[in-house]
Structures are given as C-alpha cells and as structure tokens.
Image: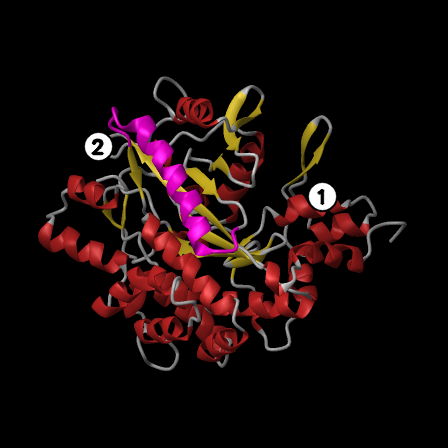
C-alpha cells in the first residue's frame, strides 16, 4: 500500500461519535408513507405531490430546501432537524440530538403539527406501518435522485426483495452515543444481539400490497432478503470479544456502490472497499460515504444507529426512544440486556431473527420461550427517571396483550375487518 489511509485512520472515523456520558443524546429517524384516501402512494412529482408538500413545509417553517439538479429532496431546519426522502418518496423526519425525551417529543410533535396543518383540507394520509399496505414496488415510482440510479440496479441483482426495501417499507431508527471504542463496540454488540427481540416487539407489517404478507414483520423479512453483503446482524460483531476493528473489517469487505467527486457520483460497483483502500486512492470522505451504504441491524454512523424497527405510530416511536435510553445509557441495564441473548450460537441467532420476522412476539427463542417473554424481561431492565418512564406505556400495553401490532393487525384483518383496507388505513393513519 502506498501513502494511503491506515486502518487506524479508518477506525478514527468512529471516534467522532464518542461523547462524555454527561453529553449523551438521542436522535430519532422516523419514516412514513404518504398516501391518498384510498391508500395509493402520493406521487413525488406534480400537483399535490410530495415535492410540492415539502416546498409548502419550507414556506411555512422557513426550513431550507435541499435539492439536487433542481429537484427538492429534503429540508434542513438549521438546528439539526431535517426532512429527507426515501427512494419511494417515503418522508423521513430526523430530530436534532436531544438530551431528554421531552425535548425529542417536542420536536417530533412540532413536525407532525406542521404536516397536519398543511394537509387538513386534503385527503392525504400519514401511515405508520412497516410496509406499504396497498402498493407493490412496481406501483411506486422512484424519486429521481442520482444515488438511486446506482443503488436500484445493484439491489435488484443482489437480493430477492431489494426493491421492496427501497420503495415499499418504512422503519424507525434511533441514534445514540458512546463514550469510547470499548463502549461503542459493546453497545453495537448488544444492539445487534437484541435485533430479534426488538424486531418482534415492534413488528408492524403483516399486510402488504393489499394482502397478508405471511410475516408479522414483512419489513424485517425484506431486509433479510435484500443484500447479505451489507445487511443482517454481522456475526463477528456479536462475539463477547468484538471490537470496532471487527466492524471496520466487515465494512471493508462489503461491495462498494459509488464515490463522490466534483462532477458527481462515480459508479464503483464491482469491487470491495478493501481493494479500493489498498490501491491508495481512498479518502475518509469515500469511507464515510461507503459506510452510509451499509444497512445492518445496527451500524456506526458514527453514532450507533438501531435499525431493527418497523415503522409505527408516533407514540411507538417515542417508546422506542425511551427503551433505547433506558437500556443503552445504563451500564447495569446494558449488561442485563446482553445476558438475555449472549449465549446464543450464530445458528440460533439467525434462526431467531427469522422467527421474529415470521411470528413476532409469538416466535420462539433458543431457550424455548416465546420472544414475548424476552421482550418483557428487556422492558423490565430499562432504567429511566420517573418523568420518562411513562413513555414506555405503549410497549407495556402491547406486552400485556401478548402480541405485536403486526400479529394483532392480521387477526383484525381476518376476523373483524374482513379484508377491508379502509379499516387498516384508518387504524394506521396518524390523524384519524
């Protein structure tokens, strides 16, 4: 290797996420489907489309438009908050880093209020679900963004359900801090290890494209069939002795998609980042961009981003934030959470991951108990202040009933709703 980046240089990128414990914050990424009253996807382009709605949001709030080639693809609030678009014109809200759940809720509710005001005279629905209930990927037009010109054909070839992931799923992610390399590796290990339990607890995509999906979390199943080279739960990073170097080595061996230069994106499909790095041409900016194209159940960006969660209603999103804070910002709770899943073999972990997708909280863990029992134990271990503990109430309600939202939706669909899509849309719409 010539005068190029060292492994230490690559690892140093993760140190940007280190914070003193007193400065720990949370960040929420909340994705949502926008549809008409019948559940058909709101188009990106044209009158009353998503692009026009973003422009109206900017005019109302003063947020700055983020565009590419003259097209609007997001908004910048100027204070850490922003809105962005997923490939199928799903809208994603990103909060600023918030020290308290109260502050995070305030930002979240403010965003919801703006959308409510902008659409109160229209038939626009805001759906909190993990999969599009009405449309298949072929019925959803992709937004005209350059990176997706490269990502879409790659995912079409790399996995069975990549287009479902891009156009017809929504998730809820939480970003959280770490204090140093060991703390980051430990938190990443626990986040990846808990993926089946969290996916089961938040499963919410049992209906997709007008029919039962066969899964409590169709979104989770879709990710398992998207691209195994950049998705999943990363076995080396779920070992007791795992380090950030294990994550870096996994990322180095993942296939590249593109790099960015002055004239635009350069297609880099066909080589792994390790090969490019060894050529001496890689920059830290290239490494940063490459890491943004990896989609495991938890990743470093450089904060830890938890990615195991189906889209859901705002209260469930806030409950997720509370659970993350209660587990990952308490050393005692973190150790107790890891003890729930630490003795699983790779084979058991993979099987349980798929069990969670298929059956939700009714899925069976390696110990022979249903995942609802582990989810209950996880919730019991969360440590929050008395003021923040009520944010967990939506999860307590789910666990008292014993079934995830995905499981309950399927029961209602088959027994009470008779396959009536309007009932599902009413249930999933924020503003009903």
Q: Which residue is mark 2?
A: 38
Indicate left or right for 65 with 310 as reference.
right
Q: Quadrant of residue 386?
A: bottom left
Which range is magenta? 98-124
Mark 2, Cα crowd under 10 Å, few <14 / some 14-19 / many 20+, is few
Give how far across and how far down residue 1 sits, in percent: 87, 53
Q: Quadrant of residue 49?
A: top left
Mark closest to the chain's N terminus, 1 or 2: 2
Asked if 316 appears above or below 398 in the picture, the reply is above
Indicate left or right for 387 with 270 as reference.
left
Give how far across and how far down residue 20 sits, in percent: 65, 62
SS for dot 1? helix
Dominant secondary structure of the magenta stretch?
A: helix
Give how far across and how far down residue 312 sits, in percent: 33, 50
Q: Which mark is residue 286?
A: 1
Q: Which mark is residue 135?
A: none
What residue is at 26 percent from the left and 57 percent from the top?
405
Is residue 120 rendered magenta in the image?
A: yes
SS for dot 2? loop
Q: Quadrant of residue 358?
A: bottom left
The front one of 45 and 303 is 303
Whether residue 384 can be seen here: yes
What residue is at 9 percent from the left and 52 percent from the top?
416
Give how far across and how far down residue 129 sits, in percent: 32, 47
Asked if 59 appears above or below 401 in the picture, the reply is above
Is residue 320 rendered magenta in the image?
A: no
Whether residue 221 can be seen here: no
């Amino acid at each position: 290797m010539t005068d190029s980046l060292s492994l230490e240089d690559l690892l140093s990128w993760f140190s940007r996420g280190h914070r003193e414990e007193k400065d720990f914050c949370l960040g929420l990424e909340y994705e949502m489907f926008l549809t008409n009253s019948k559940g058909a996807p709101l188009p990106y382009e044209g009158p009353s489309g998503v692009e026009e709605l973003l422009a109206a949001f900017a005019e109302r709030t003063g947020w700055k438009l983020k565009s590419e080639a003259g097209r609007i693809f997001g908004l910048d609030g100027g204070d850490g908050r922003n809105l962005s678009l997923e490939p199928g014109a799903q809208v994603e809200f990103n909060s600023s880093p918030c020290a308290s759940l109260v502050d995070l809720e305030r930002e979240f509710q403010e965003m919801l209020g703006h959308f409510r005001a902008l659409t109160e005279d229209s038939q626009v629905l805001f759906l909190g679900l993990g999969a599009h209930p009405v449309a298949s990927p072929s019925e959803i037009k992709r937004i005209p963004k350059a990176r997706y010109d490269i990502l879409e054909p790659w995912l079409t070839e790399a996995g069975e359900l990549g287009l479902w992931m891009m156009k017809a799923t929504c998730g809820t992610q939480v970003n959280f801090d770490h204090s140093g390399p060991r703390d980051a590796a430990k938190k990443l290990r626990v986040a990846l290890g808990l993926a089946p339990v969290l996916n089961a607890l938040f499963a919410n995509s049992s209906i997709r494209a007008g029919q039962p999906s066969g899964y409590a979390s169709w979104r989770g199943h879709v990710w398992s069939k998207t691209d195994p080279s950049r998705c999943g739960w990363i076995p080396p990073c779920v070992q007791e002795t795992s380090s950030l170097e294990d994550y870096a080595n996994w990322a180095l061996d993942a296939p590249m998609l593109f790099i960015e230069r002055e004239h635009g994106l350069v297609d880099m499909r066909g080589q792994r980042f390790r090969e490019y790095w060894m050529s001496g041409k890689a920059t830290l900016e290239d490494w940063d961009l490459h890491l943004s194209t990896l989609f495991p159940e938890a990743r470093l960006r450089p904060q830890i981003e938890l990615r195991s969660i189906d889209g859901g209603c705002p209260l469930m999103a806030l409950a997720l934030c509370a659970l993350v804070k209660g587990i990952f910002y308490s050393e005692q709770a973190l150790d107790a959470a890891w003890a729930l899943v630490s003795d699983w073999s790779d084979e058991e972990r993979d099987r349980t991951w798929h069990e969670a997708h298929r059956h939700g909280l009714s899925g069976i863990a390696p110990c022979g108990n249903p995942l609802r029992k582990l989810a209950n134990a996880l919730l019991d271990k969360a440590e929050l202040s008395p003021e923040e503990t009520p944010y967990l109430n939506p999860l307590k309600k789910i666990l008292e009933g014993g079934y995830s939202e995905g499981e309950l939706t399927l029961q209602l669909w088959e027994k009470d709703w008779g396959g009536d899509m309007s009932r599902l849309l009413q249930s999933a719409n924020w503003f009903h």
